[in-house]
């Protein structure tokens, strides 16, 4: 059985309140998904800043919690049947917290299926494709002379933006009511600012996207979650 209070990660990031859920994260698009969700559902938790430096995410302590060396990850000392549980992968954590709290996942089995569908769309589409676009536009990939990788991700990002834009016709949120799918999607839409590609992608041509982002950012829980864990 998982020993939450004495988990190896606590040697580097000790828990001040081990009875609370422990979040190990950094405020990237994937990281803030979990802090926003925790703020939305009001579950007590303690946040630990894990930087993206190898000295943190590839440390033995962090690898003991997430062998894939990516943020975010959690330890919940009050897991299913009262037993502690640890989790990594932001989508899996969102589903876990939604089911634990009974919030932001819909009221019926059909609602849950639709929400999960759009959550998987983000995990398999928006996140990986936008991340690759950022690599080839802003980071080391921008030095590659062959234009084909960059063009591929530009075109795929445009296609995905159109999918979101079309789905938002006539509704405020991606799966009907506000849900973990929105919590997953909008931070990645905001990430396009960081990559400096919004004009390149024709952002203003997608009429539903900016109002969608604005609605999301108006939520007090979102405003809090975007700054957790604090980086300074």
Image (spheres, rainbow, N blue to C red):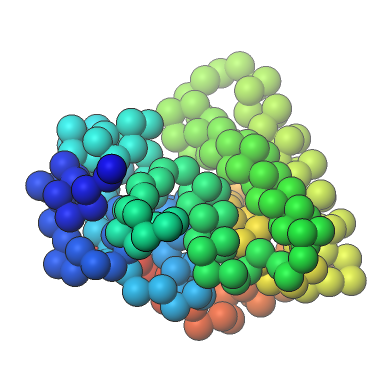
Tally of numbered discs:
0
Q: Is residue 169 left or right of residue 147?
A: right
Residue 29 position in % (x across, y down): 49, 53
Residue ID at (82%, 64%) = 168
> 133 above or below 11?
above
Foreground residue, 74 or 215? Answer: 74
- Residues 137 and 67: in front is 67
Question: Residue at horizontal 41%, vertical 73%?
Answer: 43
Q: Report the residue at 53% width, 69% height from top.
A: 101
Horizontal relation, residue 145 to residue 12: left or right: right
Q: Residue at x 55, y 48 (%)?
A: 91
| Above or below, 126 relative to 204 | above
Q: Is residue 87 left or right of residue 49?
A: right
Q: Residue furthest right?
A: 170
Q: Quadrant of the N terminus?
A: top left
In percent of width and height, residue 227 lies at 37, 69
Residue 29 vs 123, above or below: the answer is below
Camera-side residue: 213 or 99?
Answer: 99
**Can residue 167 be seen?**
yes
Where does the C terminus fall, quadrant-wise? bottom left
Looking at the image, which residue sits at the far front?
A: 81
Q: Position of residue 225 (x, y in %)?
A: 43, 70
Whether 37 is drawn above or below 94: the answer is below
Q: Nearer the viewer, residue 173 or 104?
A: 104
Find residue 131 and report its image quarter: top right
């Amino acid at each position: 059985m998982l020993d939450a209070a004495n988990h190896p990660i606590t040697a580097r990031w000790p828990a001040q309140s081990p009875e609370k859920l422990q979040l190990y994260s950094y405020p990237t698009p994937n990281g803030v998904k979990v802090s926003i969700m925790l703020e939305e559902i009001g579950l007590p938790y303690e946040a630990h800043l894990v930087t993206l430096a190898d000295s943190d995410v590839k440390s033995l302590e962090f690898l003991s919690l997430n062998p894939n060396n990516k943020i975010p990850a959690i330890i919940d000392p009050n897991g299913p049947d009262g037993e502690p549980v640890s989790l990594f992968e932001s989508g899996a954590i969102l589903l876990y917290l939604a089911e634990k709290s009974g919030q932001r996942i819909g009221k019926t089995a059909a609602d849950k299926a639709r929400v999960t569908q759009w959550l998987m769309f983000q995990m398999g589409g928006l996140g990986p494709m936008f991340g690759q676009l950022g690599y080839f536009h802003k980071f080391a990939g921008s030095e590659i002379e062959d234009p084909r990788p960059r063009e591929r991700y530009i075109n795929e990002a445009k296609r995905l933006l159109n999918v979101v834009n079309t789905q938002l016709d006539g509704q405020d949120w991606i799966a009907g009511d506000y849900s973990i799918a929105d919590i997953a999607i909008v931070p990645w839409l905001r990430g396009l600012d960081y990559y400096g590609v919004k004009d390149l992608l024709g952002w203003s041509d997608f009429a539903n996207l900016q109002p969608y982002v604005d609605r999301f950012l108006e939520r007090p829980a979102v405003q809090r979650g975007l700054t957790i864990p604090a980086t300074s």
